[in-house]
Image (cartoon, coloured by chain):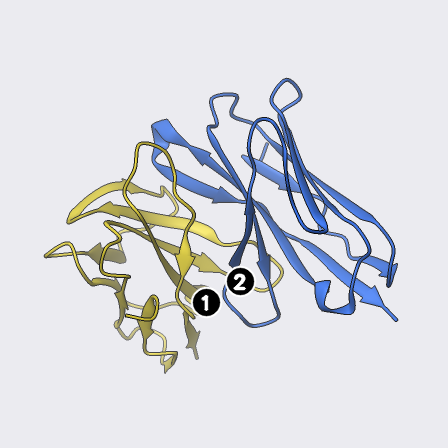
Chain colours: A blue, B yellow
């Protein structure tokens, strides 16, 4: 089983729609969680950290479910500029590494 | 200091040659990571430095790969006897010190093509 798993998609949704991605992780001792965004042929960039109580940044909401070992990302009122690959990242403190998921490709259609 | 800098941006090499990449992290970041990314995949962890100490190394990193961070500032990643399977984007990232994980800031990467 992979340490971090995401549905690779692609997800194609119309502009203005709400879209949600999940990401599961295998190590119950995982301590840090992030969502990154990566545009085609660019480096990944931090979208948001994920906190235990859940957090929101504008149209983006991140949730953590430790019992089921998954994190989620919700995008409301999607924009054309949201088209990108979204990467889930999990930190394993004991292993001193941040592990990326495969990424979920999202395309927002006009 | 505007961000993480990687050089070269692109490298084409013949199979069997050695290549070396350089990463200059943000100056106040003491943590430095190397990742490898192939098309359609997420970045794959290679190795991690805290200051000059290499604290974690992926089992995927064969003995042809070596990384250094001699003075705890810039880092180099060397691949010896390159193979076509080494073709990928090599990403360097750095982060602030702390008890947990701070978000990574990535460089623009070095794209390696082995022909």
**The N terminus of chain A lies in which quarter of the figure?**
top right
Residue B48 rendering spot, x and y as whole percentages: 30, 46
x, y percentage for residue B13? 35, 80
Q: Residues within 10 Å of mark 2 (few under 14, many from 20)?
A: some
- Residue at horizontal 34%, vertical 36%? A96
Q: Is residue A46 above or below residue A22?
A: below
State yes or no: discs 2 and 1 in contact (Cβ < 8 Å): yes
Q: Residues within 10 Å of mark 1 (few under 14, many from 20)?
A: many
Q: Secondary structure at mark 1?
A: strand
Q: Residue at x 81, y 49 (%)?
A: A19
The C terminus of chain A: image quadrant: bottom right
Camera-nearest residue between B20 and B17: B20
- Left or right: B77, with B41 as reference point: left
Mark 1 chain: B
- Seen from the viewer's position, the closer of residues B97 and B91 is B97
Q: Earlier in the sequence, mark 2 or mark 1?
A: 2
| Chain letter of the residue carrying label 2 | B
Reply above or below: A67 against B36: above
Identify the residue at image location x=57%, y=27%.
A52
Label tally: 2
Residue A31 placement, left or right of B58: right
Q: Position of residue B47 (x, y in %)?
A: 32, 48
Q: What is the distance, in whole Å, between disc 2 and disc 1 at their CAs? A: 6 Å
Instruction: Return the residue nearer the eye: A67 or B110.
Output: A67
Q: Please name the residue that numbered disc 2 is placed on.
A: B38
| Residue identifier under label 1 | B89
Give the left or right position of residue B61, taking residue A60 as reference.
Answer: left
Based on the displayed image, in which of its 4 quarters is residue A37 positioned?
A: bottom right
Q: Is residue A58 above or below residue B88?
A: above
From the top left corner, tell me how far across and down residue A69 is, in percent: 62, 25
- Name of the residue lying farthest toward the front: A58
Q: Are marks 2 and 1 on the same chain?
A: yes
């Amino acid at each position: 089983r992979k340490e971090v798993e995401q549905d690779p998609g692609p997800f194609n949704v119309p502009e203005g729609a709400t879209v949600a991605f999940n990401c599961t992780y295998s190590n119950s001792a995982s301590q840090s969680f992030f969502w990154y965004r990566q545009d085609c042929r660019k480096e990944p960039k931090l979208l948001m950290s994920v906190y235990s109580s859940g957090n929101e940044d504008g149209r983006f909401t991140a949730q953590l479910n430790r019992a089921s070992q998954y994190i989620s990302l919700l995008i409301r009122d999607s924009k054309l500029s949201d088209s990108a690959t979204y990467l889930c990242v999990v930190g394993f403190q004991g292993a001193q590494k941040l592990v990326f998921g495969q990424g979920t490709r999202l395309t927002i259609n006009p | 200091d505007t961000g993480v800098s990687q050089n070269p941006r692109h490298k084409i090499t013949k199979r069997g040659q050695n290549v070396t990449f350089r990463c200059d992290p943000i100056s106040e970041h003491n943590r430095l990571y190397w990742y490898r990314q192939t098309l359609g995949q997420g970045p794959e962890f290679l190795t991690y430095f805290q200051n000059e100490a290499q604290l974690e190394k992926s089992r995927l990193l064969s003995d042809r790969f070596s990384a250094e961070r001699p003075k705890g500032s810039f880092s180099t990643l060397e691949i010896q006897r390159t193979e076509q399977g080494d073709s990928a984007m090599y990403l360097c990232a750095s982060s602030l010190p702390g008890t947990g994980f701070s978000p990574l800031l990535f460089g623009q990467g070095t794209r390696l093509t082995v022909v």
